[in-house]
Image (cartoon, helix red, strand yellow):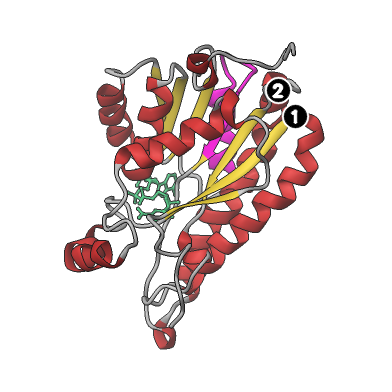
Amino acid sequence: MADNHFTPHAALFDLTGKRALVTGGTRGIGLMIARGLLQAGARVVISSRDAGACAQARSHLSGFGDVEAFPADLSAPDGCHRLADLVTADSDRLDVLVNNAGAMWREPLETFPAEAWDTVLDLNLKAPFRLVQALLPALRAAATPDDPARVVNVGSIAAIHVAAAPNYSYAASKAGLHQLTRVLARELGPQHVTVNAVAPGPFPSQMMATTLATLGDAIAAKAPLRRLGHDDDMAGVAVFLACRAGAYLTGAVIPVDGGIATTASGT
Ligand SMILES: NC(=O)c1ccc[n+]([C@@H]2O[C@H](COP(=O)([O-])OP(=O)(O)OC[C@H]3O[C@@H](n4cnc5c(N)ncnc54)[C@H](OP(=O)(O)O)[C@@H]3O)[C@@H](O)[C@H]2O)c1
C-alpha cells in the first residue's frame, strides 16, 4: 500500500535546513544538545550571559556545523526580548526553540531566602514562557502540518521524584515547566508547533559538579542503568524531538535518567 508519509531512514533524523536556538548552550546539557543538533545538520544559535563563554563555545561547536552565539541574560523580560530580536534579525523563521538555561538553589528550609524563589522561577519558568511568546511568530513561520516547529523545554526528574537535597524553588520551577509544556502543547498543536519537555537525570555539568564529585559514584551505582548520563544521551533525545521522527509527539515529558526516577520504588 502506498504511504505518502514514508521518509527514508537518514532523512527521519536529518535537520539540514533547520535553524535552532539553544539557551544556555555554552556548557553542560545545552552544549550537549547544541552539538547534537549541529551534527544532525541544523544551524544553531546558542546563548548565555557570559560573552566570553559564548565565544569559546561557538569556537568549539563550529567544528560540528554552522553556529552563532548571542550573550543575553534571560532572567528578565528585556533579556528574553533582546535575544528573540537577535535571533530573528536575519531570518524570520525558527524551527526549534530549546529552553535549556536554568539555575538551581539548594538551601535548608529555615534559611531558604526569597531571592532563591525569584532567581530560579525567573529563569527556569518565566524565561521559557517569555521566549515562546517572543518567538512564536518565527516558530509559526517555520511550521507545517507534516513538520511542525518544535519547542523543547529542559525540565528535570526533580519534578518527577523528590530529591534528597532541599531544592524547593528548583523542584517547583521544573514541575511548573512540565505542566506549562502540556498547556502550551494543547494551544499550539493546531498551529503546528509541538511543545515537549526532557526531564534529565544526573548529567555532568557545572550545576551538578559538587553533587557528582561527592555522590556521583553512589548515584550511578544505584541507577538501574548503573551510570550517569552521557553527552550522546541528551544529544539523541533533543535530535529526536527536533526532527521528522519526533513530529507526532506533543505535550510529552520524557525522562532521560537511566531509570532513576522512572523506576523509583519509594520503599
Ligand atoms: N545537569 C543535570 O544533571 C541536570 C539534571 C536535570 C535538569 N537539568 C537542567 O538542564 C539545564 C542545563 O543545566 P546544566 O546542568 O547544563 O547547568 P549549567 O552547567 O549550570 O549550565 C547552565 C547554562 O545556562 C546559562 N545561564 C545561567 N543563568 C542564565 C541566565 N540568567 N540567562 C541566560 N543564561 C543563563 C549558563 O551560562 P551563563 O552562566 O554564562 O549565563 C549555562 O550556559 C537546566 O535547566 C537544568 O535545570 C540539569
Relative image position of residue 91 (x, y in whole percent)? 59, 14
Ligand 1 lies under 8 Å from the Cβ of mark 2: no
Residue at 74% across / 13% down in the picture? 1
Looking at the image, residue 185 lies above or below residue 36 = below
Relative image position of residue 129 (x, y in whole percent)? 64, 47
Depth check, front residue: 166 or 58 = 166
Q: Mark 1 near mark 2, Cβ–Cβ under 8 Å?
A: yes
Looking at the image, residue 153 lies above or below residue 134 = below
Q: Which mark is residue 192?
A: 1
Three-letter amino acid code at the position of disc 1: His
Label 2: how many residues lie within 10 Å, few (<14), some (14-19) or many (20+)?
many
Residue at 30% across / 24% down in the picture? 61
The reply to whether the magenta stretch includes residue 42 is no
Secondary element type, mark 2:
loop
The reply to whether the magenta stretch includes residue 85 is yes
Question: Is residue 76 visible in the rendered structure shown here?
Answer: yes
Secondary element type, mark 1:
loop
Question: Is residue 68 visible in the rendered structure shown here?
Answer: no
- Answer with left or right where residue 176 lies relative to residue 38: right
The quarter of the picture where the C terminus appears is: bottom left
- Answer with left or right where residue 167 lies relative to residue 7: left
Relative image position of residue 45 (x, y in whole percent)? 45, 26
Q: Which mark is residue 143?
A: 2
Looking at the image, residue 227 lies above or below residue 245 = below
Q: Which mark is residue 206?
A: none
- Answer with left or right where residue 58 lies relative to residue 217: right
Residue at 48% across / 74% down in the picture? 168
Label 1: how many residues lie within 10 Å, few (<14), some (14-19) or many (20+)?
many
Looking at the image, residue 124 lies above or below residue 54 = below
Q: Which residues are magenta?
A: 77-98
